[in-house]
Amino acid sequence: MWKTSSFLAASAAITAAAQLTVRELDVGLGQCGVIELEGGKTVMIDAGPPASVDSTFPYLAAQGVATADVLIVSHAHSDHYGGVSGLVARGFAFGEAWDNDHISVSSAWVSASELAGYTGAVGAIRDVITAGWWHALGPMTTVECLYVNGRYKNGAALDTDGIENDASAVILLTHGIYRHLFPADISTNVDLPLVPWTAGLHSLVAAHHGLNDGTSAAFLSNAQPLAALFSVPPNTTFPSPETVDRVIAAGAAVYLTNRGSDPRGSVRTNIVITTDGLTGFTVAPSDVFYIPEPVAAAWVLAIVFCALRSRFAPPAGGLQTG
């Protein structure tokens, strides 16, 4: 299936690459991403709105996913955290829960009942995510918070002006060579300073459900993703045609969870990406994206070096959980 050189084949044995699956679930207007590492851990990035549980829970159960080691809720909008209480009520279990600490008081975007449902579901496992936080799913697989609450992982600050979308946690998934970004609902005010860590992404979720206030041309020019996933409701104004224009101009294939307003994307409902982390990735059922072998070879060497180095000293400046 993959185009693999003898060098990469040998390197694969060294790095013990496992299969990674990334699912962008159809939750209507909202966000829910599930990361599963073969023989490793499972992470859920947001849980969709309350009503989405009727589809997400049976879908995940059919895939054999009944637990997530880590839940990350990007920000305090119910289309991102509202599904948590419903999943738990049906028997889904979380090992840890991390959020930006804004789901804490009843407010314009957090109703009293939603607050009670969320806090009751996560209880004592809840903690606050900060920029630079990271978690290892396996030897070559991590999720890392690049930005949250107006703070980047390098310490740089941004005035969010009280806009909750711009307080979203931005999560970078790395599996060997493969890199995928969950930007939640950040606007173009937030995305450009991310470029030190997002150059050469392989795939991403379009920010803010593909609306025109996110996923800037300058950010895309640096990231150059091969595939862009849009979590959108059916038959609506989502995504913005301008955002789709920018993504296509950057060279990315477009995938949508629903047929929204733009006919140019491929609808996959629950979008599923699989990758070995070394040579490329597939968007189910059969769209294959290859990583050029010279690039892959350089990354494999870097991965092996970092793996050996990590035996003697943990990465500086980060927090590993689990």
Image: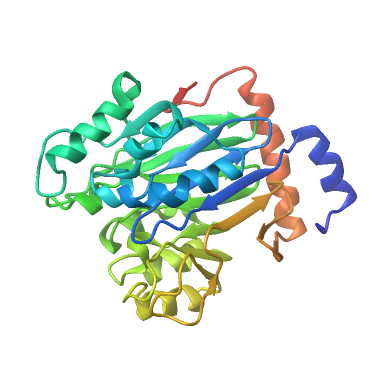
Q: Where's residue 320, x and y in %?
A: 47, 24
Which residue is located at x 64 percent, y 25 percent?
A: 309
Could you say which quadrant of the image residue 98 lies in?
A: top left
> In the picture shown, does residue 133 fall above or below 260?
above
24 relative position to 1: left or right: left
Q: Where's residue 203, x and y in %?
A: 54, 58
> In the picture shown, does residue 94 fall above or below 200?
above
| Residue 154 visible, this orientation | no
| Residue 259 visible, this orientation | yes
* In-front residue for pair 73/281: 73
> In the picture shown, does residue 71 fall above or below 296?
above
Q: How is the image coloured?
A: rainbow
* In-front residue for pair 262/278: 262
Which residue is located at x 90 percent, y 49 percent?
A: 6
Q: Most extreme residue toward the right, as rendered?
A: 6
Q: Where's residue 22, x and y in %?
A: 57, 49
Could you say which quadrant of the image residue 128 lies in?
A: top left
The N terminus - image quarter? bottom right
Which residue is located at x 61 percent, y 44 percent?
A: 63
